[in-house]
Amino acid sequence: MKTGAKARAAARLAAVQALYQFEMEATRLPQLLDEFHRHRLGAEIEDDQYIDADVAFFDDLVKGALARRDEIDGRLSEKLATGWRIERLDRTMLQILRAGAYELMARADVPTPTVITEYVDVAHAFFDEREAKFVNGVLDAVARAVR
């Protein structure tokens, strides 16, 4: 099993993708994890070689974010600007924030700056700088509340 910064970064990106798939398709959790384990993590897709992910870390992020989704969404809702509701967020953005919030809440072994920086990097994979700054601001506010 791979560990280290790159393997964890790959696990975070894959976790956001898995959470998105769960949200959009309601794929059962065991099936979802199995699909990612067999076909996505460290796989080659359309000539792109994906970095081997830390599978145990990936599993924890996905399972934990789903198990604590209501609690996480409550935390996120508290940190959104007045007039904004979690339902208004882009679905991908919401999964980035859920995974990041879960990691801040449950993974005290990972330093706060690392968590925030990693999810800002994930946001850059999908969005422009403005949205990445939004991720930074919301996760920073969550971190202040939970750490």
Image: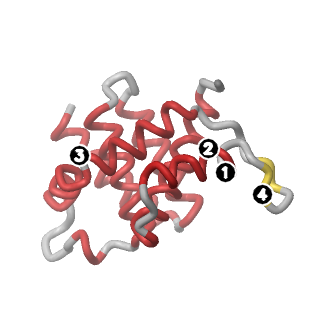
The answer to whether marks 2 and 1 mark residues whose Cβ atoms lie closer than 8 Å is: yes
Q: Rate crowding at label 1 as few (under 14), some (14 to 19) or many (20 or more) other CA atoms within 10 Å.
A: many
At x 41% / y 36%, what residue is drawn? 60
Q: For numbered disc 3, what is the local secondary structure? A: helix
Q: Which label sits in the foreground, 3 or 1?
A: 1
The number of numbered discs placed on residues in the rendered structure image is 4
At x 43% / y 52%, what residue is drawn? 29
Q: Which label sits in the foreground, 3 or 2?
A: 2
Instruction: Name the residue that disc number 3 marks.
Output: 142
Quarter of the image with the C terminus in it: top left
In the drawing, what numbered circle is on residue 40?
A: 1
Instruction: Name the residue that disc number 4 marks.
Output: 45
Q: Amino acid at mark 4?
A: Ile
Q: Amino acid at mark 3?
A: Val
In the drawing, what numbered circle is on residue 37?
A: 2
55 with respect to 90 (left or right): right
The answer to whether marks 1 and 4 mark residues whose Cβ atoms lie closer than 8 Å is: yes
The answer to whether marks 3 and 2 mark residues whose Cβ atoms lie closer than 8 Å is: no
Q: Is residue 64 above or below residue 32?
A: above
Name the spot of residue 12 as percent of width and height, x first: 51, 44
Q: In the image as oriented, which residue stretches furthest toward the right?
A: 47
